């Protein structure tokens, strides 16, 4: 009997040691930094798991605040590093994972940038991207998270999946892609052919009625609704519309499935 109890105790100890890397109580760590700029400073962010929130402000420096969170104990936190480097006029913020195991932590950033800092590529995964009151031609990339961008002095492109996209009050727009979530986008201008597409969700576009463009819109099991926008249409069906606004120009392709497409005039 005693031998059985001893063996049972050894088995429990082995099991517990094997579970040392499993999910447990959440632990948190914090990172802060402040970085000087010049009139030509650019900023890029690469985050692998977590949210990125970038806000323009009247301060003189770039400030970075990050929260590291893990449910795998201190080891999970130790396997994630935040790297901020300044090379010439460029500030680069990167989340690095040093373990070969699965990602065991998330990092959520809040970054404040002076208005004259130019944003470049902002990347994450499994987290939202929020950008407001900034400058630069921005490429925002994530997955399983929303993208919301507004008040940007530049051309904005955005790609995610399983998250909605909202783009408002920008100088222009590039390609916009998601899936299984809605898109709302203001198109004030664009510099080349662009596409706006999702699936299983509605697309709402507010379009500068002074643009010259060829538009093609397709959906399924729903309708395309233009209100206050008149196209010279070469094809007009409930689920497929091709037409020209103004005179022929760069194309705007808008596509979804199982949901409506709405096009309204963009108000000044």
Image (cartoon, grey):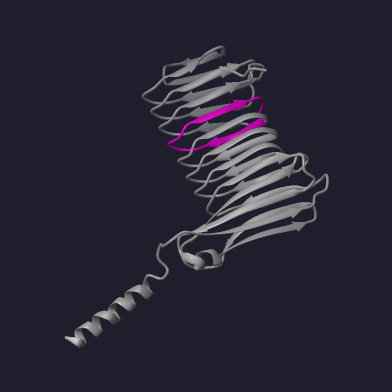
Rendering quarter of residue 213: top right
Relative image position of residue 84 (x, y in whole percent): 69, 58
Q: Position of residue 182 (x, y in %)?
A: 47, 31
* Residue at horizontal 20 percent and vertical 87 percent from the top: 2
* Magenta run includes residue 200: no
Residue range highlighted in magenta? 172-192
User: Residue 120: x and y, percent?
Assistant: 68, 45
In front here: 192 or 175?
175
Between 8 and 104, the residue placed more toward the observer is 8
Residue extending farthest front: 2
The residue located at (65%, 52%) in the rendering is 65
The quarter of the rendered structure image containing the N terminus is bottom left
Q: Residue furthest bottom?
A: 3
Nearer to the camera, 159 or 65: 65
Kindly indicate the quadrant of the structure image that contains residue 245.
top right
Query: In x, y percent, where is residue 180?
Result: 42, 36
Would residue 245 appear left or right of 91 to someone viewing this image?
A: left
User: Can I make out residue 136 in this image?
Assistant: no
Q: Is residue 116 visible?
A: yes
Q: Residue 181: within the magenta?
A: yes
Q: Is residue 265 above or below residue 88?
A: above
Q: Quadrant of the C terminus?
A: top right
Which residue extends farthest left?
1
Q: Between residue 25 and residue 207, name the one nearer to us.
A: 25
- The answer to whether residue 77 is above or below residue 67 is below
Q: Residue at x 50, y 33 (%)?
A: 197
């Amino acid at each position: 009997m005693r031998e059985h109890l001893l063996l049972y105790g050894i088995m429990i100890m082995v099991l517990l040691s094997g579970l040392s890397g499993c999910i447990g109580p959440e632990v948190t760590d914090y990172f802060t930094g402040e970085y000087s700029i010049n009139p030509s400073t650019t900023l890029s962010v690469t985050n692998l798991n977590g949210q990125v929130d970038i806000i323009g402000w009247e301060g003189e420096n770039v400030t970075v605040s990050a929260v590291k969170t893990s449910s795998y104990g201190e080891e999970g936190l130790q396997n994630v590093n935040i790297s901020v480097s300044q090379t010439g006029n460029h500030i680069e913020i990167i989340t690095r994972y040093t373990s070969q195991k699965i990602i065991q932590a998330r990092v959520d950033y809040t970054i404040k940038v002076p208005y004259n800092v130019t944003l470049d590529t902002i990347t994450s995964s499994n987290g939202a991207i929020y950008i407001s009151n900034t400058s630069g031609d921005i490429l925002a990339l994530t997955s399983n998270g929303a993208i919301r961008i507004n008040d940007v002095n530049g051309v904005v492109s955005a790609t995610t999946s399983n998250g909605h996209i909202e783009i408002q009050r920008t100088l222009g727009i590039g390609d916009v892609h998601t899936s299984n979530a809605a898109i709302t986008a203001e198109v004030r201008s664009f510099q080349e052919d662009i596409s706006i597409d999702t699936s299983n969700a509605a697309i709402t576009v507010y379009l500068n009625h002074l643009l010259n463009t060829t538009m093609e819109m397709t959906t399924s099991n729903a309708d395309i609704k233009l209100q206050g926008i008149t196209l010279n249409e070469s094809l007009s069906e409930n689920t497929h519309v091709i037409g020209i606004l103004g005179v022929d120009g760069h194309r705007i392709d808008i596509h979804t499935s199982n949901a409506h497409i709405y096009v309204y005039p963009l108000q000044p």
